[in-house]
Amino acid sequence: MDYPIIVEPEGVKIKSEKMEVDKLYYCVYQEKILLFYKDSNELLNCYEIAEKDVVEEVKQSKSEDIEKILQQYVEKKNLG
């Protein structure tokens, strides 16, 4: 399946019909991490992380490490 988040110079395109329910999707755009997921009611939820250290860590990591980085951020900020 194609990744439903597409980053282009003019903005981010989201193909929500290709998103799985309760699966986290992300992209880096304009030095921010944008997080997206579709909940069980088919509503699209969007979040933004702008802290430079986290953005840089995500940009330099391998794709399999990104969820771990984001989980550590959530725990550090006591958001979960």
Image: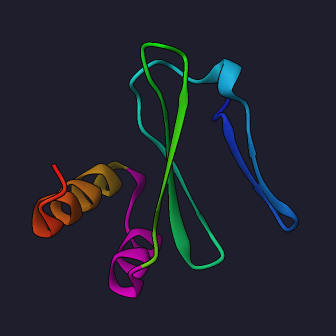
- Residue that sits furthest to the right in the current view: 10
Number of numbered discs overlaid on the protein picture: 0
**Residue plotted at (66% across, 34% down):** 4
Residue 30, position as x, y percentages in the image? 66, 76
Residue 2, position as x, y percentages in the image? 67, 29
Query: Is 27 or 64 nearer to us in this picture?
Result: 27
Left or right of 38? Residue 77 is left
Residue 72, position as x, y percentages in the image? 16, 62
Colour scheme employed for the rendering of this structure:
rainbow
Q: Is residue 80 in the magenta section?
A: no
Q: Is residue 55 above or below residue 71?
A: below
Residue 23, located in which quarter of the rendered image?
A: top left
Q: Is residue 61 in the magenta section?
A: yes
Query: Is 6 or 46 nearer to us in this picture?
Result: 46
**Residue plotted at (34% across, 85% down):** 53
- Residue that sits furthest to the top in the current view: 41
- Residue that sits furthest to the bottom in the current view: 52
**Residue plotted at (42% across, 14% down):** 40
The quarter in which the N terminus is drawn is top right
Left or right of 40? Residue 78 is left
Q: Is residue 54 above or below residue 8?
A: below
**Residue plotted at (11% across, 59% down):** 75
Residue 65, located in which quarter of the rendered image?
A: bottom left
Residue 34, position as x, y percentages in the image? 53, 58
Q: Is residue 66 above or below residue 3?
A: below
Q: Is residue 50 above or below residue 27?
A: below
Q: What secondary structure prevails in the magenta region?
A: helix
- Magenta region: 51-63
